[in-house]
Amino acid sequence: MYFGGPVQTERGFVLHVPAGHYSSSLSVAEDIALTTSKDVLEAVADGSGPAKLFVTLGYSGWGAGQLESEVSANAWLTVDARPSIIFDTPADERQAAALRLLGIDPAQLSAQAGHA
């Protein structure tokens, strides 16, 4: 179980593969879904749930258009969702694995700001 953010920390979110057919699922990528209904947890409990899952409580939120604006300003690095990184890579290695998808070697990053 992970902490997803400061908003609605009593609300659970399940990111999972395969997507399945649950009451309130949103397709995130090919065969990856985000489900907020309890039926996915009931399926996990009875052994018929998704093969892999990532559970969080709460979420982080942005105002209308804020996230899109930040992405267009290159404030975020984005990559396609990869089940192998999300579900099979240890949590402390996920950021580096995602950076490598962009051709970035995390060991070459610096916390210092440059001035040109």
Image (tube, rainbow, N blue to C red):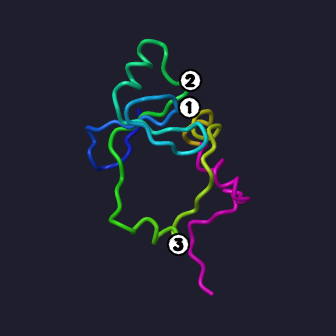
**Image spot of residue 69 (x, y percent):** 45, 72
| Neighbour tally class for label 3: few under 14, some 14-19, many 20 plus, Cα within 10 Å | few
Q: Residue furthest bottom?
A: 116
Q: Please tell me which residue lies in front, 69 or 23.
A: 23
Q: Alpha-carbon distance for marks 1 and 3?
A: 29 Å
Secondary structure of the residue carrying numbered label 3: helix
Secondary structure of the residue carrying numbered label 1: strand
How many numbered marks are there? 3
Residue 17's disc number: 1
Q: Which residues are magenta?
A: 93-116
**Image spot of residue 21 (x, y percent):** 47, 29
Disc 2 and disc 1 in contact, CB within 8 angstroms:
yes
**Image spot of residue 115 (x, y percent):** 59, 84
The residue pinned by badge 2 equals 51
Is 45 situated above or below 37? above
The type of residue carrying mark 2 is: Ala
The residue pinned by badge 3 equals 72
Residue at the spot x=56%, y=75% of the render? Answer: 113
**Image spot of residue 112 (x, y percent):** 57, 71
